[in-house]
């Protein structure tokens, strides 16, 4: 058989779940991981331990891979170009991926193709932040380093020019954005193949706590059908215009006046798509693998009226395994996904999925299980 | 975290799919495999290469495992007893597993607990086979070596005493059974934990071609509800009486006069349960893992009105990967499960699952995909 080898850079939980979803396809999976203890390295057979920031390491890893894809967006663009020059397909490619790596590039490109974003511009210093505020509705203003942020890191909400010093200390360009008056956050997840085939998952509602995704509801409840369709089309258009290959998550603000604005882009399987593992015909991970191999994509439609995902964050007590007894006995339909990571307070160590006909019930079950695993619910 | 280590003896596809199903639980999976090329060894991180028939190898493997379970039923009973004496939980244990290893022991025990089987007895030689035939409705008679058979191997259907020489050549006891006049084969799959909790999957119809499982339909179409309940209860009773831990497949004949008779027992995830990977709330593999860890079991109910599994056998052309293009494009809901095995004619190298509301459609889609992958359908 001539089954291909998929090279995955990064050993986090996204790589772990991509491996899990790739096993049924019979493909070979090769992992570049920082340490043997990383989430994916625990469950993959063919693991290379090394630093993705080192080009020689990447090149040696890529030899024998039919395609390279990613657990994260931190591989330097010039390294990706070097791999492409070596003849290794890199999916998503550097020209697409830069839009998920650099928020300044992303905003400029979305402006150019007419995709609605929060009001924004690159700012030079705290005085310039004050000028940006004055150009619109004033403070508060959101400041973001254009590179390196995730899960609320690298993001500041400032109420005055005096509060705006911190973001400039890193020495990277800073993007200022209006603080959008949104009613909720949504996410539009799509997958696109090199062939140009694309599929759209139903638009979901994503609820954050302290800047970290907490709960995802699929599909987003009470979402106007036209707005849902508009958001899906927008995500498909971004994927096409930017030449994305693989999974693209478009994080959106739903504004009080009924529009959607793009918050962030992620070009890899995404937390807002984890519900699809148990809730869709084809999971985001399975479709990401199919896309990077340029195979026909699988059906993204939901299998149940409602699916809810709640992240399991590390709490005060480190033994989550003993909590399985209660959680599994209470809810035989519960789907637990743990990442093999050590428990640290606030760290994403897993998620749970539930599905069913009654949203209140589905939400309660997922929240209970996640809370019990974390240790914030004890009965 | 104190997540346990599950030791799996045997590197076949059942181990591969058990690993896949265990990843979400965050448990550690350790594999004893004959070669690094074995189906499961390709996808598991922690692999020991060794011979399960060697006690020292088994003992060294078992050190550091919290529980031992199996991909197959070939580990010698005395080795399992030695592991238990070392303090390693073996699930299923040797006293249960012997009923899946030795058809003579199995028949005697099922007789003792009043479970209906085909008429049978151990026979000494071809003359004794003739006597066995004369005690009932005459030839044909089914002869089975009590140990070592699978997928039609170790089974003979003989029309006369003259044809009955072959089975006796191996020098192991031979079991004679009446050739049952059955309308179809069924399978009742159940999973039982050490705790004594048990779940029953819906009874399925299993269609064989040349003694090898070809198609499984879940649930079995047009099966009388009382007979289905009776079969599930029988399987649950066998699991309880024999002290099975983990998955038990009870292969059944449905007779022309409306009874079910036990054909074979398997104490591990089983081909007749592969449909559950995409068709049930909890797959047989996930429930097997939960059972051997004595965790509460998951819901075994179907997620769709009909699920069909068709095995993919090796055909004349070795490149099944290129067939993915056609199969995936034709049916975006198709679920392919390939085992990473080299294609040899007639060898089980994978299976496909389909599900939906219309049985004819679901059957056609699964058959088409399996035939196309094998190369017997080319359009």
Image: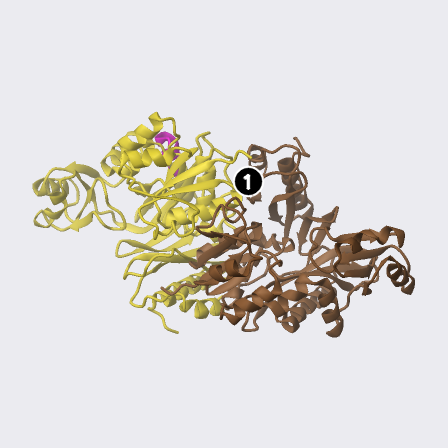
Chain colours: A yellow, B brown
In which quadrant of the rendered image does the N terminus of chain B lie?
Answer: bottom left
* Front residue of A376 and A73: A73
Residue A268 in percent (x, y) is at 37, 42
Residue A319 in percent (x, y) is at 36, 67
Dividing the picture into quadrants, the one containing residue B72 is bottom right
Q: Verify whether residue A242 appears in magenta.
A: yes
Residue A21 makes an appearance in the image: yes
Residue positioned 66% across, 48% down in the render: B358
Residue B34 in percent (x, y) is at 54, 50
Residue positioned 76% across, 59% down in the render: B253
In which quadrant of the rendered image does the C terminus of chain B lie?
Answer: top right
- For the record, the magenta segment spans A235-244
Image height of A36 relative to A194, above or below: below
Image height of B113 relative to B74, above or below: below
* Front residue of B88 and A345: B88
Residue B7 in percent (x, y) is at 49, 59
Residue A116 makes an appearance in the image: no
Residue positioned 72% across, 57% down in the render: B186
Residue linked to disc 1: B332
Left/right placement of residue A221 relative to residue A184 reads right
């Amino acid at each position: 058989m001539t089954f291909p080898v998929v090279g995955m850079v990064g050993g986090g939980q996204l790589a772990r779940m991509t491996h899990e979803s790739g096993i049924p396809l019979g493909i070979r999976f090769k992992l570049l991981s920082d340490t043997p203890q990383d989430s994916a390295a625990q469950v993959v057979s063919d693991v290379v331990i090394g630093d993705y920031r080192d080009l020689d390491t990447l090149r040696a890893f890529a030899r024998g891979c039919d395609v390279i894809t990613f657990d994260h967006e931190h591989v330097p663009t010039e390294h990706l170009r070097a791999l492409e020059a070596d003849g290794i397909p890199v999916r998503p490619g550097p020209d697409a991926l830069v839009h998920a790596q650099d928020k300044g590039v992303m905003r400029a490109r979305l402006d150019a193709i007419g995709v609605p974003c929060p009001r924004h511009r690159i700012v030079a210093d705290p005085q310039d932040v004050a000028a940006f505020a004055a150009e619109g509705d004033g403070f508060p203003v959101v400041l973001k380093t254009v590179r390196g942020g995730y899960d609320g890191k690298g993001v500041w909400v400032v109420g005055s020019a005096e509060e705006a010093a911190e973001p400039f200390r890193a020495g990277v360009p800073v993007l200022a954005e209006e603080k959008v008056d949104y009613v909720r956050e949504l996410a539009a997840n799509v997958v696109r193949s090199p062939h140009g085939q694309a599929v759209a998952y139903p638009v979901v509602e994503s609820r954050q706590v302290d800047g970290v995704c907490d709960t995802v509801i699929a599909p987003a409840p009470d979402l106007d059908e036209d707005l849902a369709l508009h958001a899906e089309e927008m995500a498909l258009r971004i994927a096409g215009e930017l030449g994305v290959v693989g999974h693209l998550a478009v994080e959106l603000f739903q504004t009080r006046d009924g529009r959607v604005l793009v918050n962030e882009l992620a070009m890899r399987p995404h937390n807002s798509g984890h519900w699809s593992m148990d809730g869709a015909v084809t999971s985001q991970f399975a479709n990401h693998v199919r896309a990077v191999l340029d195979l026909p994509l699988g059906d993204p439609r939901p299998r149940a009226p409602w699916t809810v995902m709640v992240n399991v964050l590390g709490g005060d007590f480190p033994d989550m395994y003993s909590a399985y007894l209660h959680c599994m006995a209470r809810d035989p339909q519960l789907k637990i996904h743990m990442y093999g990571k050590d428990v640290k307070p606030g760290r994403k160590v897993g998620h749970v999925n539930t599905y069913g006909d009654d949203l209140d019930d589905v939400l309660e079950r997922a929240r209970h299980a996640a809370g019990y695993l974390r240790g914030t619910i004890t009965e």
